Image (tube, rainbow, N blue to C red):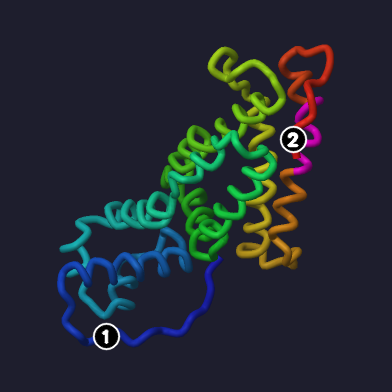
């Protein structure tokens, strides 16, 4: 996954502690997204133009630095408004899902985000599991719950969201996410109209949801169609 980039000439200007910390984190994001989490802090320090002891003055261990990268890239870019948007029942679910994924992809569809995510999984850092847990609890379960409401099915507070329902939400989310993988990891050709791709993915879920969810929840007849 490594890429070749020009070495930047370190700045000789003396930085305030807050500025230096931001510089280290910013360069660490670039560095680990290029070489993976096996990258050495010695090389990172060289890129920054500082000594390794100085780097450890700000981050006492490599693990502490990686944790800060995780918080900056994955938690710092998480928007609580996403859940609010998904819960806004004054709008059709289709419109909510399309707008949510348009917002979400502006954050996730960046080379450093997806490369760090993939490297984290390969390195077994646990970052992916933590992010997926948050994604499922905050967003995917909400999508499942809103699907039930839209179709007039049992409320998720009375009937637990099943693993199969979660897989339906993952089918939607994973398909859109894999577009990002193909573009930034495999560097394969992808359809450039991402907005249209999101609409098609959402429609595929919603068109099949009445039949599939009706069967999963034991309905003899498929529930009503979803508003458009």
Q: Farthest right residue?
A: 221
| Image position, residue 64 (x, y; %) | 27, 53
Q: Residue at x 22, y 59 (%)?
A: 59
Q: Which residues are magenta?
A: 203-211
Does the magenta run of residues contain 205? yes
Given this view, does label 2 or label 1 mark the residue nearer the observer? 2
Q: Residue at x 63, y 58 (%)?
A: 180
> In which quadrant is the C terminus drawn?
top right
Q: Residue at x 41, y 47 (%)?
A: 125
> In which quadrant is the N terminus drawn?
bottom right
Report which residue position mark 1 lands on: 11
Instruction: State the predominant SS element of the stretch in magenta.
Output: helix
Q: Characterize the local packing of mark 2: few (<14), some (14-19) or many (20 or more) Cα atoms within 10 angstroms.
A: few
Q: Is residue 21 above or below residue 119?
A: below
Q: Is residue 61 above or below residue 82?
A: below
Report which residue position mark 2 lands on: 227
| Left-right relation of 29 to 224 | left
Secondary structure of the residue carrying numbered label 2: loop
| Image position, residue 143 (x, y; %) | 60, 34
Viewer can see residue 150: yes
Q: Quadrant of residue 210?
A: top right
Q: Residue at x 29, y 77 (%)?
A: 48
């Amino acid at each position: 996954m490594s890429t070749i980039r020009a070495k930047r000439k370190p700045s000789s200007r003396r930085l305030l502690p807050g500025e230096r910390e931001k510089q280290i984190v910013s360069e660490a994001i670039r560095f680990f997204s290029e070489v993976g989490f096996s990258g050495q802090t010695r090389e990172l320090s060289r890129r920054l133009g500082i000594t390794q002891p100085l780097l450890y003055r700000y981050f006492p261990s490599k693990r502490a630095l990686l944790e800060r990268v995780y918080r900056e890239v994955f938690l710092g870019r998480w928007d609580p408004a996403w859940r609010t948007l998904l819960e806004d029942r004054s709008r059709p679910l289709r419109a909510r899902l399309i707008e949510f994924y348009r917002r979400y992809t502006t954050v996730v569809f960046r080379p450093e985000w997806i490369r760090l995510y993939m490297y984290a999984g390969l390195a077994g850092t646990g970052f992916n599991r933590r992010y997926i847990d948050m994604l499922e609890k905050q967003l995917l379960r909400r999508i499942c719950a809103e699907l039930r409401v839209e179709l007039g099915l049992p409320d998720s507070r009375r009937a637990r969201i099943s693993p199969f329902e979660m897989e339906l939400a993952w089918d939607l989310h994973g398909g859109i996410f894999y577009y990002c993988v193909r573009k930034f990891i495999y560097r394969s050709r992808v359809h450039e109209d991402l907005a249209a791709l999101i609409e098609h993915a959402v429609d595929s879920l919603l068109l099949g949801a009445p039949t599939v969810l009706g069967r999963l929840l034991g309905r003899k007849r498929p529930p009503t169609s979803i508003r458009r």
